[in-house]
Amino acid sequence: MANTLADHLRSRSDAELGDLLRLRPDLVVPAPTDIATLAARAQSRVSAARALDDLDEFTLRILDAARLCREPSAGAGSADAAVELDAVLAMATAPGSGATAAQVRAAVDRLLARCLLYGSAGRFRVAGGVDEASSPYPAGLGRPAADLDDRVARRCADPAALRRTLLSAPPSARAVLDRLAAGPPLGTVTTAAAGPAAGTQAREAPATAAPAALGPGDGVSPVRWLVEAGLLAVVTDEPATAGSQAVELPREVGLLLRRDTGPLGTLRPDPPAAGSAERDPKAVDSTGAGQAMELVRLAGALLEALAAEPAPLLRTGGIGVRELRRLARAGGVSESLAGLLIEIGYAAGLLGAAELPATASRTAVDQQILPTGSYDQWINEPVARRWERLAGAWLAMTRRAGLIGRRDDRDRPITALSTDVERAGAPTVRRTVLGVLAALPPGAAPTADEVLTLLAWQAPRRSRGRDELHREVLDEAAQLGVTGLGVLTGYGRSLLAGEGRDGRDIAADDDPLGVRVTEREHRGAASTVERALDDLLPSPVDHVLVQADLTVVVPGPPEPTLAAELELVAELESTGAASVHRVTPASVRRALDAGYQAAELHELFARRSRTPVPQGLTYLIDDSARTHGGLRAGSAGGYLRSDDEALLATVLADRRLAALSLRRLAPTVLVSVVPAGRMLEALRQAGYAPVPEDGTGAALRTGRPRARRAPVRHPVTLRSVDPLAAPKLTAPRISGLVEQLRRGEAAARAVRRAPGPVRAAAGQAVDGLAAVQAHSQALAVLQQAVRDKALVWVGYVDAHGAAASRLVRPVSIGAGYLRAEDERTETLHTFALQRVTAAVVHD
């Protein structure tokens, strides 16, 4: 068996190395230069923790068994301690554990494939970094009694006496023992309850597991009895609050208390059952599609509210609580859903921040959140495509909308679009939760508690303390229509699998460079998600039913053009499969203001309505058009006012001022479309002496030009890649990495075979060599080798900055370069002399 992980990796085949890189892709960031570097990185605490985070509960318990079964000859915590497979099998398949030998071997194989264990099938070692990244209490068992306390060690040294003491424990004391035996083995008690042994000194490193609270409710005398009986050890290397003391259950006592279930406790080799309730897949898709259509409508209403009245951005970031409440009322949604839709809209590029000059300060700049140009295109797209853009942004955005409305550590409210909502791991959490639903058979409807139980089994380290976040994901998925009736929809599965508009029809392994494009990308056709959802949605309608009470019934989702027309000429009263609108005098005036003529409105209703247009609607349109425009309001860039009518007549007739487009409104008033500042400058250049005045008519001594406005800023598009996710490695990429490792290993072997000065120049420790060979000395050796045509070991720094060495025969030296032949590969190499670090003649 290999003594080190590096030796074990060198003995692996290329396919086995490729499997390791596929299972632990973080090892290739950045790409390791040789196998020794790969082994060191695999045994780092960060990489080991990443690998452990992906393991299920049962595999982690088998790893705990391997840590407990290390041979005591090398020390239980020694990295050189070997583990016998038979010992792990005996511990994991003890009566009452619930695991079989085949299941344990499969778990060991998973650990060996990830190099968390390495060695042969029957004897292996625990990789470095595993102990550091894991709990100091494997399987919830405490440290051996010999490492805790002399009194406890003496008690546990006699198994028969330990058993008798345990049987004589009072019921209250036995309850404390059972509580600690379930793990973790630490508890905290008051100093008085710990008894006179509280001053006993403990050894070993401090633990990190959270201790159980053993307060007065558990009884003071039972804990004192256990400490004095030697069944609990008082430890002083554990953090404790004032007036309290930490106690630890020795491993020997914990094993004795677990005699009915085995040392590891009750194991669950298989995932817990979930999804006992069944739902019809068609009903699931129909329910989800209805919610998806409603989501698109609500998002459009909220974005329209922002277009009508943009929301100011706070100086501290985010949209204020009052603005969010206003938008929620305008969109007809709750504040929590409004916050979610704003975050999704911003992530989808439909919302952005525009900089506007502030009125309170000359230097300050206010920002407003309003729709971007992409919104105009999005609103005219089919419903399925609009939903896909929103759902894809939700799945990929690094924001946790569930935090909006809560308070931070400084008791300030967390607002939408603020930095407090940023969570880099949010995309991974969403995909993990939806992945649990996707793994279930179609129609299986698990409860939220069943989903949390499955997550806790599949990745207990990653799921710990995230129950609230997982429930938020389930609720948001239901609100978006990704799930229906608690089940992942068919189009939701396609979205999760990456079959949306950003997905690719060609597998990455078949197209590693991404040079091929799909036919859909050329044509802009519908994606798999869009087609699946579009088949579930009712077909858009292009007609309405106008009734005598001036209500307009739309028997289905309106097409974009019809929806835009209805929004202008009618008021929305109710939504659903058939929406209801009503024509009012205000809506008719709104259409006339937008540029419609009375005849055009008559033609619109006659063309769109499948029922006869009622006479009341005709009268309403004609009456509104008759009074429309009786008063006219407009704007002017500036005006001229003077009591001297002759002077105004002269200015109006002056051809030099024709560009001002002056127009007389009254005998003493002229107006122009040109701003007042430019008008003043033109008048002065023409020889006049105008004086500016403010809104009250008071003369101003000086006029200031308006400050320059900043351009509207487009929103940053959301990255579709999870920043915390490991890189996805394709088969060609893995093959190239393995080949690079082999080349680097060959170069490292060459360095190990090189003479001392060359190895010292490569950064290796060499006995008796205090300094690297001088550069002038290396050049002298090379010049002599050219004359003698001798073989020379050359140490140099390659183009990547890595130290390397090569056995070559120098051919020539000149122009700052060494040209030498490698007889083994029959190739000619060129070395820059400034990169040469050492040269030694080969013996």
Image (tube, rainbow, N blue to C red):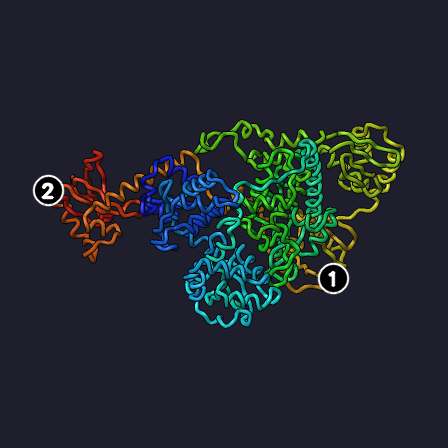
Label 1: few (<14), some (14–19) or many (≥20) C-alpha neighbours in 10 Å = few
Q: Give the camera-side residue of 104 and 565.
A: 104
Q: Give the camera-side residue of 715 and 699.
A: 715
Task: Residue 297 in the image: state x and y as whole percent.
Answer: 71, 40
Look at label 2 and name its amino acid. Answer: Arg
Q: Which residue is mark 1?
A: 697
**What whole-number distance in Å separates the C-alpha atoms at marks 2 and 1?**
100 Å
Mark found first going from the N terminus, 2 or 1:
1
Q: Disc count in the image?
A: 2
Give the residue drawn at x 54%, y 40%. Answer: 270
Give the residue drawn at x 21%, y 44%. Answer: 817
Q: Give the camera-side residue of 414 and 729.
A: 729
Quadrant of the drawing holding the N terminus = top left
Instruction: Give the answer, above or below, for where 171 lies relative to 710.
Output: below
Q: Which residue is mark 2?
A: 787
Label 2: few (<14), some (14–19) or many (≥20) C-alpha neighbours in 10 Å = few
Task: Residue 577 in the image: state x and y as whole percent.
Answer: 76, 34
Give the residue drawn at x 88%, y 32%. Answer: 614
Element class at badge 2:
helix
Element class at badge 1:
loop
Q: Relative to residue 8, is residue 557 drawn left or right?
A: right
Determine which quarter of the picture holds residue 419.
bottom right
Q: Relative to residue 98, is residue 89 drawn left or right?
A: left
Look at label 1 and name its amino acid. Answer: Gly
Confirm whether residue 683 shows in the render: no
Q: Give the camera-side residue of 747 and 627.
A: 747
- As drawn, the residue found furthest toward the left would be 788
Instruction: Give the answer, above or below, for where 771 lies relative to 60.
Output: below
Dot label at residue 76: none
Task: Residue 276 in the image: state x and y as whole percent.
Answer: 65, 38
